[in-house]
Image (cartoon, helix red, strand yellow):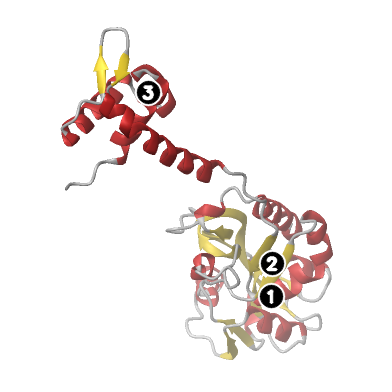
Amino acid sequence: MKRIPLNWLQAFEATGRTGSFKAAAEELNVSPSTISHQVRDLEAHLGTLLFSRSRRQVVLTDEGRNLLPDLTLGFESIRRASTTDRPASTRLHIGAFPFLANEIITPNINALRQVLPGAEIRLFTHTDLDALTRVSTAERLDVVVRYGPSNGRIPGFASRKLADVALVPIAGPAADVDGPASLLRQPLIRVLGPFQGWERWLAEFAPEVEHPAYSLETDSFHAAMLAVARNEGVCLGVLPYLSRWIREGKVGALSDLTLPLSDQAAYAVYAPFQASNPLIERFVTWLKDVLR
C-alpha cells in the first residue's frame, strides 16, 4: 500500500482536534482550502469518510473518531520532542592553525574563559571541515578558524567573517631592510599555503623577479615566523594574525609594501546546526577584538 503523506495525516489530526478547517489552517500556517484538500485526499486514499461536513462545521465520523486518538498521541510526541528545552551547550571545541592557537588564543585563554564562564574549552591545531560533523561528539569540533573566499560561501557550512587578510613582508629585528631591493637580498622563507604569497607579492612589487630562490620552504606559518624572529630570513606575514608580533617588536614589517588579498578572508566556520550556539557567537566577538 502506498505510504500516506504526513501532511495529510497532520491536516486530519489538527482538524479533528480543533473542530474546524480554519483553526487547523491557522495552526499549521496554511490555507483552509489546503487543509480541506489534504483531508479529502486522505479520505480517498483510505476509502473512508472521516468528517461529516456542513456549511458551519465539520464533525468526526465514527471512522474519524477511531483514527484520531492514535494520531494525536503521535503528533504530540513529535511536538514534545521538537520543543523540549535543551540544555545550553557547555563546551566549545575550537580548531585553529598552530600560530593562531599558540601565539594568539593560548596567551589570551584566561580572557576567553571569562567570556565563556563554565564552558569546557578545548583547542586543537587543525582546521579540517569534516571535523565539524563527525559522528563522535568527542572528536567533533564546534568551530574552526580558517581562510575562505571573500564571499564567505563555504558549501555545507555556515561562517562568520573575522577579518580581511593581507600579506606584509616581515624581517627579524636585526635585519637591515628598507625596500623591495634590500628585502630580496635576504634569505627568502616561503610558506606553502593557500595564497601563493611570494608569487602574488612579487607580481605586484617586483615583477622583474620571476623565480626567486628560497632558503626555507615550510607548510607551517608558525615555523616560518619563528625563523624570521631569529633573523634567519624574511617572509610574508599574514595580517591581522601577525599584528601583535609587529606591535611588540618581535618582527619588523614593511607596511608600505602590504598586499591586501581581495579574494580571501578569515572566517569562523561551523556546521549549520550550530547557528544558535551562543558560545560560538561569544567566541567570534572575542576573537575579532583580539585580532584588532
State the residue at coordinates (55%, 65%). Answer: 147
Q: Which mark is residue 25?
A: 3
Which residue is nearer to you in this view: 259 or 159?
159
Q: How many other residues sit within 10 Å of disc 3, few (<14), some (14-19) or many (≥20)?
A: some
Q: How many other residues sit within 10 Å of disc 1, few (<14), some (14-19) or many (≥20)?
A: many
Q: Against 15, is 233 above or below?
A: below
Residue 210's spot in the image, x, y percent? 47, 81
Q: Which mark is residue 169?
A: none
Marks 1/2: CA distance?
A: 8 Å
Q: Against 12, is 139 above or below?
A: below
Q: Mark 3 is on which residue type?
A: Ala
| Image quarter in which the C terminus is found | bottom right
Can you identify the residue that label 1 sits on? Answer: 99
- Report whether 46 appears left or right of 123: left
Q: Mark 1 is on which residue type?
A: Phe
Task: Select label 3 or label 1 by which is in front.
Answer: 3
Which residue is nearer to you in this view: 63 or 25?
63
Can you identify the residue that label 2 sits on? Answer: 241
Q: Based on the displayed image, in which of its 4 quarters is residue 163 positioned?
A: bottom right
